[in-house]
Each structure stands twice: as C-alpha cells, then as structure tokens.
Image (cartoon, helix red, strand yellow):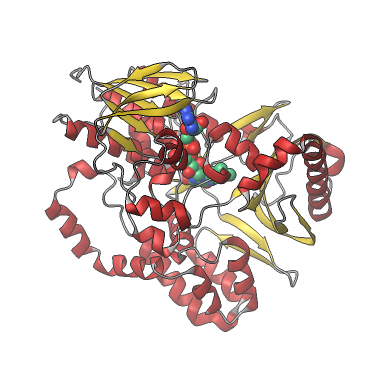
Amino acid sequence: MQETHKHVVIIGAGIAGLSAASYLARNGYSVDVYEAHTVPGGLCTAWKRKGYTLDYCIHWLMGTKKEGGFDRIWDELGALVNEDGSPTGIVNFDEFMRVQLSDGETFKLYGKIDRLRDEMLRLAPEDAKMIARLCRDMRTLSRLPFPGVIKEEWSLWRYLGFALANLGKIRIMLGYMNKRIGDFTAKWKSPRMREFFTAIVPQDWSTLAFIFGLALQENQSAGYPLGGSLRFARNIERRALALGARIQYGKRVNSILVEQRSAVGIRLESGEIVRADHVVSAADGHATLFEMLDGKYLTPVQKKAYAGWPLFPSSVFIGLGIGRDLTHLPRNCTLRLAQPFALPDGTEVTHIGVTVYHYDPDMAPAGKTAVTVIINTWKGEFWKDFVRDNPAEYAAWKTAIGQEVVKTLDTTFGNIQDAVEVIDVSSPHTVMRYTGNWQGSYEGFAPTPQAMKTRLPMQIKGLDHLYLIGQWSSAGGGLPPAGKGGRDVAIAICRRDKKRFSGKMG
Ligand SMILES: Cc1cc2nc3c(=O)[nH]c(=O)nc-3n(C[C@H](O)[C@H](O)[C@H](O)COP(=O)(O)OP(=O)(O)OC[C@H]3O[C@@H](n4cnc5c(N)ncnc54)[C@H](O)[C@@H]3O)c2cc1C
C-alpha cells in the first residue's frame, strides 16, 4: 500500500478504535491511537483472578460463520486468529439460554427454530398461531443476507437489485423493526410467554432486536469465540500493530482541537498536544460531543438522541471462580429470585442473568468453572456520587451482594457455596471509570423503533476532518457495528483524500 504520510489520531482502543487503526494503517496512513486504559478492548474485556478469567462481554458474536457478511470484517481484522496463528474456535449453542418462570416452568430458548417452536408449543399451546407465524418469520429473516457491510464494492444498481430480490424479507424485517416489543408481548394469550418476553427484553425496544438475534442462531452465524473478549480484542490489536499503527495506553484525551471549523488534533490530559490531518473519536459519544468538543458542535439529531433516547443499561457484575466442574449446569440462564432485593440505586432486582463458562476451557483451571452474573440497572449516574461519598458502604455492599448471589446459585443448583474461590464485584462506577461510557451504558442507545430508524452522522456538518465511530454511532451498539465503524471511517477518509480504499492487508 502506498504511504500517504497523512496523520490520523484515533481516540480510544475499543473495538471501533482498533478497527479504524487497522484499516487506516493498511491504507498507508500514519496512525496514532490514544487510549485512557492500560489494555485494548474497551467494553470488550475480561480480567484474571486467581487463575480464573472473568469475561465481561462476548456472549454471541455476529459474523462467526463464513457467509460474506460481518465475517469478512473479522477476517480482515484478524479478530478470529489467535496469537499462535491458529483459528479461534467457535461454539454454537443448541440451547441459547433458559428462563425460569413464576409457575415453576423453565423456558428453554433453543437456537434452532424447530426445537424452539416445540418448546413454545409445550409452554403455550393456546398461542399456536402466533408461534407458527413467529417461526416462519424468523426462518425468513435467517435467510436475509447483509447488504452494506462491504459498502465500497456495491454500486447503487447492485443495492437496488438486492432490495428487489429481497423485498419480502425486508418488509418482514421493517414490520418487526417498527413494532415495540411491549406491543408484541401483549399479543400473546399465554401468561408464560408474556412473562418470558418481559423478563428478558426491555419493553420499549424494537421487536426486531430480539427476533433477529434468534434468527442468527438458526443458521449458526453468531457463535461464541473461545478465549472470550480480551483474546478477541488482542487479536485485532496485534494485526493493527503489525500493519504499523501505534497505540499508546494510559493516555487520556481531554479535548479535540478545532481551528476554522476543522479538527486539527487533540490535547491529552498531560497537556501534550498532538496535531493530525484527521481526528477519529472512537470513545464514548457523550464525552466526545459534550466534553472534548465542549457541546459546541451538535447536529439536531445528536441533540435529540442525547436529550431523550433510551439507553442500554449499565450493570452490576459478579464474577465467580468455583473450584468445581459444573458441566452439568445450563450455560446461560435467567433466574427468577424467590426474594427480590434492591440495589443501592433503588433498582428492584427480580431476575439475574447467569453464565456458566464450562464451554470455554480458557476461563478456569482444569476441573474448575468461572461463572458470571449480570444485573441490569439504568441508574448509572447514581454510582459516581455513591462510590465517591460512601467508599466504606460501597465496599460493604460489594461483599454483601457477592454473598447473596452465591447463596442464590447454591439454592438453585446446589454444591456451589463451599467451592467458591473467587468473588469479584464491579458496578456501573467501574464501567465508567475504565471505559468512560456515559451512564455506564454497555451498548449505547437502545434499539427502540425510533432510534433504529434514525441515522446518527459519522461527521458533523461544518466541522471538517472529525469522525465519530463506535457504539454511540448507531442504536443497538455491539461489536459488529464497532468493527464496521472502523472500516467505514477508513473508507470515508480515503474518499476525502481521493485515495482508493482497500480492506486487504498489503
Ligand atoms: C456485559 C456486556 C455484554 C456484551 N455482550 C455483547 C455480545 O455478546 N455481543 C456483542 O456484539 N456486543 C456485546 N456487548 C457490547 C460491546 O461490548 C460494545 O458495544 C462494544 O465493545 C463497543 O465498542 P466501542 O469500541 O464502540 O466502545 P468502547 O468499548 O466503549 O471503547 C471506547 C474506548 O475509548 C476509551 N476512551 C474513552 N474516553 C477516552 C478518552 N478521553 N481518552 C482516551 N481513551 C478514551 C475507553 O477507555 C475505551 O477503551 C456487550 C457489552 C457488555 C458490557
């Protein structure tokens, strides 16, 4: 690839920032990434405790199957190639998750539609018609290819051809996209089905967010990469470095420098100024717009989004190391608590999400098992003051909730309490501290029908040479849009510099 000698500064080494670094470096740019934390990955992370790996992020990854969609981006980024050159193993689950219901039944959410249909008919025979329609639509959606992933190769005519050929599928997709899951939930006769949907999806989200995820399970294109989140991030980092990108850790960016309505560089927390031809922010969207740019350059749609769009929750996360083989347990379940409790921010906890990592040998020493528990909260901001003003209370709460969760797991599954080797608790405060995400949200703007229909701009009109990517750039967040954002920004910058973009490595 021909060197352009143009310099790009990227803020943040999450998956979006690493992806942008990788694609820009291979297109001849001189790339510097500044990352506040000491490791790559941002939210896509994990940490070690006494030989256990407590994984915070990946439960399923869109694009794990070779089919010309997001897989191509992961391929170009080297995301699924391990340090020793071996391909990352992918696990597809027969049973995606199970949910405990109040009448003592358990709903098993199978990945394959036929099995899922039988399970729904078992639990809700009175909804046979709804079930048939849902399964038919999911099957149809599972066959919808992803246009637009490899944008630069598609002409307008090809897009139109694609749209015409897939008109029926697109119509079904838009129908679900425009429907709130609350309205969809209300249509079921069975109280079990209504309880199920209410327990696992916020009711103001688009129904598509739920159905599309399941459709991907049908054709096994969203599996789990063995080694988990940090390995995935390290794989992308390794290729970006090999291509010549430079990444500096422990360097927080305080502001984006603007001269004559053009971004010309950044100022680090240390006061150091770095000038650049282009600035890409792959950091938290709110901090970029309201702190690094002082709230001076918002488009109308950004103003609206940050003023009122619902967000993904933040979380209380409990990582456990259990000195036992727990292969007999379900790998992922939503447990209904016999005795709900409240978080310090007032959130009433009625369910907890449990993942038992027996399917990934990298997560625990032989014969032992890492278990993680996630509790959602939408009150991220509360935690900043709480932790600052009440450190002793916070520490005591962490101990108490860890024990409470262990007790619940012991009551539900048995044989846990006396084998606990690690209890590690983090809160929305931890998310904000280590990743800077607004309100500790773990995927940015929630996929409501309104947000899914609105495009957030990568560039701000009238502010040249600045690009915003990452999970705050489209509703629904997640790793695929982060990886794609890095590719799209490289395409946009190449176009701006009248260069031909290439996704290839050299
Ligand atoms: C519990 C959990 C489960 C999830 N499960 C899945 C899943 O199964 N599948 C999936 O696809 N997605 C999942 N996600 C979502 C996914 O992890 C995120 O959407 C994605 O990682 C966001 O990447 P990003 O690069 O846009 O942002 P981030 O990961 O937030 O990266 C931003 C980076 O910028 C850095 N930064 C911020 N401010 C500054 C500054 N001022 N100066 C320098 N650096 C700065 C941060 O430290 C961070 O490293 C999950 C997330 C969580 C938390």
What residue lies at 43% left-to-right and 41% top-to-bottom? 285
Query: How many tags in the picture?
Result: 0
**Residue 178: image location, x then y, percent:** 39, 68
What quarter of the picture does the C terminus occupy? top left
Instruction: Write down the quadrant of residue 192 in the picture.
Output: bottom right
**Residue 50: image location, x then y, percent:** 73, 26
What residue lies at 55% left-to-right and 22% top-to-bottom? 38
Residue 389 is left or right of residue 303, and the answer is right
Of all residues, the one furthest to the right in this rendering is 418
Residue 109 is left or right of residue 336, and the answer is left
**Residue 301: image location, x then y, percent:** 34, 54
What residue lies at 74% left-to-right and 51% top-to-bottom? 343
Question: Looking at this view, is 229 or 24 the one in front?
Answer: 24
Residue 217 visible in this rendered orientation of the protein: no
What quarter of the picture does the N terminus occupy? top left
Residue 169 visible in this rendered orientation of the protein: yes
Residue 281 is left or right of residue 338, and the answer is left
Question: Looking at this view, is 24 or 139 the one in front?
Answer: 24
Residue 193 is left or right of residue 221, and the answer is right
From this view, report whether residue 309 is shown above or below residue 151.
below
From this view, report whether residue 394 is shown above or below residue 176.
above
**Residue 71: image location, x then y, percent:** 36, 41
Question: Looking at this view, is 115 or 168 the one in front?
Answer: 168
